Image: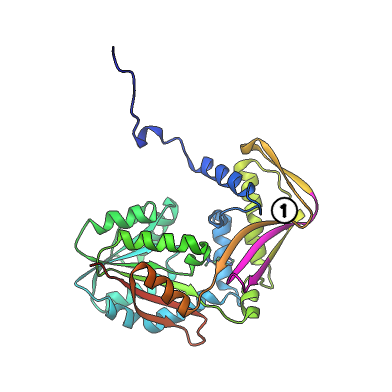
Amino acid sequence: MKATYQVLSPGDVRSCNEHDEFASDLLYGMSQPVKRIPSKYLYDETGSRLFCRIMELPEYYPTRCETEILLRYSPAIAQAVSSPRLNLVELGAGDGSKTRILINELRSQKIDFRYVPIDISESAVSGLCSNLSQECPEIAINGLVSDYFVGVDWLSHQNAARNLILFLGSNIGNFEPAHQIQFLSGLWNALNHGDYVLIGMDLKKDAAIINQAYNDAQGVTAAFNLNLLNRINRELGGNFDPDQFVYYSAWDAFDGAVKSCLLSKKSQSVYIDALCRAFSFDAWEPFHTESSYKFTISDIREKVRRIGFEIIENYSDARHYFVDSLWQVIKQ
Ligand code: AVJ
């Protein structure tokens, strides 16, 4: 008898497009005990523009602190990682404005490097590559549109150059603690002995300063969060009324994170076309949009030691609000 089975390769079944993933992530989040949505959905075109405005706000200190750190310590960082050839790999590069400080230092120290921004968003990678290559035509730039680890793993088998992974802006703080460990151990695994990681983390500090950073006077952060509802309406055919929700964000000292959400101002029901169903909100029920974990130097030491990185140096701003921590991968 003739066999009648068929084996499909991943390329044949690429039906899972971005839109399906958004819908299933939303259904998953809406089905949790506390309704939630992954914070990566904050960054559509409008959201990314609003986030650029957040970085300029007087209350939002992290970006300025990290810029201060890189301006002051780029020479030391470049010296610490100095090697004949370097891949400067950036995860979630954004507009790359802080990275440019380090890039200029590597150029002036005549270090032979190439810049590899990795992002799942094709438009982010191509925008950054084209801007940077116009400004600095002599730098070798290889953008990678891929999953972080697939990209790093691929890269670490490409050439003998040492890798320096940049993960700036306290983006790690958006992961839940268990996911932080998962992410960092995945990174460790994808890297070679001797490779470096420079990771930006926001430090625990006076609750009032933290709370102001997420509750700016101009309401840009509120608009940034409320934009999620517009995005769901537009991309998934939702009928959220953004006027019926209010942004709320507060430092939770017990968990060590800022928890941000949209509160439903009344009891209401919202229909999502793409999910073919309605969801009901109680009056003042939260819809969790983002957690921003903050760290202490000893939190960082403990985490890093467990995974197997070695801390080379913690570079901090004058007020000790933020740290760029430089780690090396030690494999036996
Ligand atoms: C880019 C994720 C680090 O959590 O501080 C800024 C995003 N949210 N204001 C943060 C954000 C509200 C930011 N991260």
Ligand 1 in which quarter = bottom right
Indicate whether 82 appears above or below 229. below
Q: Position of residue 284 (x, y in %)?
A: 77, 58
Indicate whether 131 appears above or below 150. below
Instruction: Name the residue: 33% across, 69% down.
Output: 308
110 and 298: which one is in front?
298
Does residue 92 appear anywhere in the picture? no
- Taking the image as shown, residue 79 lies to the left or right of residue 73, namely left
- Taking the image as shown, residue 121 lies to the left or right of residue 311, namely right
> Residue 57, located in which quarter of the rendered image?
bottom right
68 and 249: which one is in front?
249
Q: Quadrant of the C terminus?
A: bottom left
Residue found at the far front of this picture: 306
Q: Any atom of ligand 1 within 8 Å of the CB at mark 1?
A: no
- Taking the image as shown, residue 169 lies to the left or right of residue 23, namely left
Residue holding disc 1: 242
270 and 61: which one is in front?
270
Residue 256 falls within the magenta-colored stretch = yes
The 10 Å Cα crowd at callout 1, few under 14, some 14 to 19, many 20 or more, is some
For the record, the magenta segment spans: 249-267
Indicate whether 221 appears above or below 212. above
Instruction: Name the residue: 19% across, 63% down.
Output: 160
The amino acid on which the numbered mark 1 sits, given as a three-letter code, is: Pro
Q: Position of residue 236 (x, y in %)?
A: 61, 42
Residue found at the far top of this picture: 1
Residue 139 falls within the magenta-colored stretch = no
